[in-house]
Every structure is written in C-alpha cells, then in structure tokens.
Amino acid sequence: MKVKFYGAAGEVTGSCHFVQVGSYRILLDCGLIQGGYRDDLRNAEPFAFDPTMIDAVVLSHSHLDHCGRIPLLVKRGFKGAVYTHSVCREMCSIMFKDAANIYRHDVDTMNRKRARKHLPPLEPLYTQQDADQALKHFYGLEYNREEEILPGIRIRLNDAGHIIGASIIEFWLDDGRHQRKLVFSGDLGHKDMPILRAPAKIARADLLLMESTYGGRCHRPWSESMDEMGRILSMAAQSKGNILIPAFAVGRTQELLYLFGKYFDQWNLGHWQIFLDSPMAIEATEVYVKHSELYNQDAKNTLLNQQRLDALPNLRFTRTTDESMALNRISSGAIIIAGSGMCEGGRIRHHLKNHAWKRSCHILMVGFQAKGTLGRRLVEGADNIKIWHEDIRVAAKVHTVGGFSAHGDQDGLIQWLSGFDRLPQVCLVHGEASAQKALQEAIDKQLGVKVGIAEPEQEIDLIAITPHRH
C-alpha cells in the first residue's frame, strides 16, 4: 500500500499521483505539464508507469493541469474507469475538445514548416477522436456519497470550492490486512469566492496530500480587490484604450462575469463593450448557468434576482475566428476576456500582439502564472515579449489583482487543515519550492506539525503510517 508522485511534485502543474493497494493501481489526476516549450515536450514523453496496468483514475477537477493527459493515457492503453464529479465530466468534454483543436492547429503549422525542410511530419499529442474515446471512460459521481470503485477501495467526493465540480477526495483503502485513509485535497478554493461554496471540511485522514500553490502568500481581502478593480477600470477609461484580460476559461471567466454584473453600476461598466472571446469559456459559462445547485447562497440569491452569469446587457460572445479578429479594429472602450489564462495559447496572444505595444492599453492579470509562461513574464514586468517569433515592446500598463485567485492562500490552507479532528501526516504537492517551504514553516509554527514536501518519484509507504480510528 503506497503513494508515489509522478507530477505536481516540486512544481505546480502536471498533477499525477500513483496509489497502489494490493494488486490495484490508481492515478489521482493525470494532468498536463504547463509552462514553456520544454514543458510541452515533457507531455509527449512516455509515462513513468505502464498505462495498461492502471485500474482506475480518480480526477479532482477539469483544469488541464489535472485532467489534460487523460486522452493520452487512453491513447496509450488505459482501459479502466475515470471517476469524477458529474459536472467535472461535462467540463472535461469542453476542455479536451479545445485542447485537441489547439494541438491540431499547432501541429499543422509546424508541419508546413517541416515540409519545406523535407522533415517528417509531427503528430499532435492527441486528436478529437482520442478525446472522445477518453470521455467514454468517465463515470460521474455526486458529492457526499461513498462509492466502491475497486475491491477494498472506496472514495467520497467533497466540494473543493475551486471551480464548479472540483473535488476533495477521500479514500478508504483496505488490502485485506491493513486499512488506511488517504485524502487528496485537489485544488482548494479561496474563502468567500464568488459563485461557489467554501471548501468542505474533512474530519480525518492518515495521510493528506495537500496543494500549496499560494502557500507562500496571503491574498488581499475581497473588498480591497473589488476597490482595485474599480480603480483600474476608471484609469483605463481615462486613457481611452482597451482592457485585455487573460482568463482561465473555467472558473475565472465565470467569476468575472458574475462580478461585472454585481458591480455593473459601481464600476461604470455601461460605458464599455464587453467581449467574451473564447468558445471554450462560452461553453463553460453555459455549464455554470445550468448548475446553480452548486452555487453559494449569495450567488443563488443573485440568480433569483435575474442577474445571470451571461446576462450583462453589453456582453457579447465572439465564437468565430472572424468575430475575434474584428475586435482588433476596436481601438478604445473594449474589455476583452480571452484565453489562455497564462497567455500560452488561444486568442489572447493575438490581442496582445495587436495591443500590448499601445500605451493606452491595460492588461489585467487575474490568475496564477506558472514559471516560464508569457503571463509570468508580463507579471514580472517584461519590457519586451515574443509572440510567433515577433518581438513586441510592452507599453501597456500591466495590473495584477491577486485577490481573484481560485486557490486558497496560506491562511486559508492552514485554516482548512486545522479543521481535521486530529491532524494527519501531510505531504505538500502542487506548489513551487518557495511557496511550499513557506507553508511548511507556517504550519509548523501555527499548528506545531512538521509536514513533508513531495519530490518527483518519491514513494510513501502507507502501512508505515500509524492509522487513526475512522
């Protein structure tokens, strides 16, 4: 009975943890490694395990750094079931389709160049057909219901409050001689987030795998972030330019639309044209609208008052490429929300190429930016960026509003951890080294518990952990 780390160990992306119970082998997540070009190449490398020997995948949520290599896993021989929340399955169908389209487009572009050099063509990481095949393996579950997924292995999903359908996962493991309880936090939401509920409290565990994305910092209070957003919108209106918002299609985009509706008058948004320029985000928004049963009470009340997520009077969905290209002819008064959230692909790169060199432009960063990404370089104040081999001088004003994060901060993570009846053994995953070290020290200081930090391919023997009574 063991746990081994094959991703999101010493880094944020590529979540993938291996659990063995007797003869059964399970993956917790199977996500894409995100960052720069070298990280993209790592995704195509052979898995560190034989996909044909994996009996099941348990998926925490539908962000690509957690689910994005499942189609590749199936393509390479995985035959088992993927267990996740039913809404997460809906979201994955959207995410996989978009990823497959991006891979196809990128490979087509590269192969045209390779053909001119008489080089053999490349293949995409996976195709739409691969994505469709992967979805046939998904089995949708609901929150707060125990399910036996394999003999001696039971799971229960709990609301993680991160994005819609995201889960904290409890595992009860029994190999016939030993029983242990494992908890995987997945990604934990930020307390008092728009739309979604706070992360569920878990009472007990023998071993906890806990995310640490923002373990080294504390978010600003929501009220300060709302005030800052208002000031940025006012400043941008005075400069008579456009606002570009790189946003994750699932979660962040829906929160922004919700807040734009809630603060429509206070932020003078009636003076702007607002564009959601992402087919994937548009589909994801439709899923959010459909599943109000997962909202927090404030959002449910807002929905009852007819302020739907997609009901801003000046909001326009731009689905087609031609509609997106037309936005670049608007020189002033447009708020353009587009993916990808880290500026590594998607339509936001076209908008950056056309507007980042303008002093009147404002770029609003509202999400985590991994090392090596274009978004991270913008946040760190890059004077020049390169998009499709073209150098662009950044004259736009770049704003970072960290309070919009969908991840719990250091205080939130420690507060959630302190909710256990008895503190379990903890191993930190899904974080950069500096954030993990800071969180490790803070937990030791505040709770008097020494926690571990996962390392790539590190193995933890669950039998060696003294069990609690459950």
Image (cartoon, grey):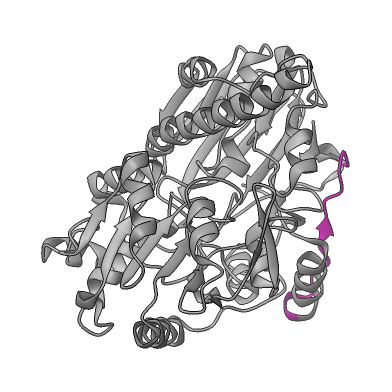
Q: As drawn, is 301 to the left or to the right of 74?
A: left
Residue 151: x, y in percent?
Answer: 61, 19
Query: Quadrant location of residue 434?
Result: bottom right
Q: Is residue 455 magenta?
A: yes
Q: Count every numbered label the image shows and give the total.
A: 0
Q: Residue at x 74, y 14 (%)?
A: 53
Would residue 91 be seen by someone viewing this image from the given angle? yes
Residue 216: x, y in percent?
Answer: 72, 73
In the rendered image, the residue lying farthest to the front is 116
Nearest the eye: 253 or 158: 253
Q: Residue at x 47, y 21 (%)?
A: 135
- Vertical comparison of 236 with 303: above or below: below
Q: As drawn, is 207 to the left or to the right of 78?
A: right
Q: Is residue 174 magenta?
A: no
Q: Residue at x 75, y 43 (%)?
A: 37
Would residue 153 be seen by someone viewing this image from the given angle? no
Residue 438: x, y in percent?
Answer: 79, 73
Residue 397: x, y in percent?
Answer: 54, 79
- Vertical comparison of 372 with 234: above or below: above
- Vertical comparison of 96 with 210: above or below: above
Nearest the eye: 124 or 89: 124
Nearest the eye: 132 or 194: 132
Query: Quadrant location of residue 213?
Result: bottom right
- Vertical comparison of 172 with 151: above or below: below
Q: As drawn, is 377 to the left or to the right of 334?
A: right
What quarter of the picture does the N terminus occupy? top right
Q: Which residues are magenta?
A: 446-458
What secondary structure prevails in the magenta region? loop
Q: Residue at x 76, y 31 (%)?
A: 178
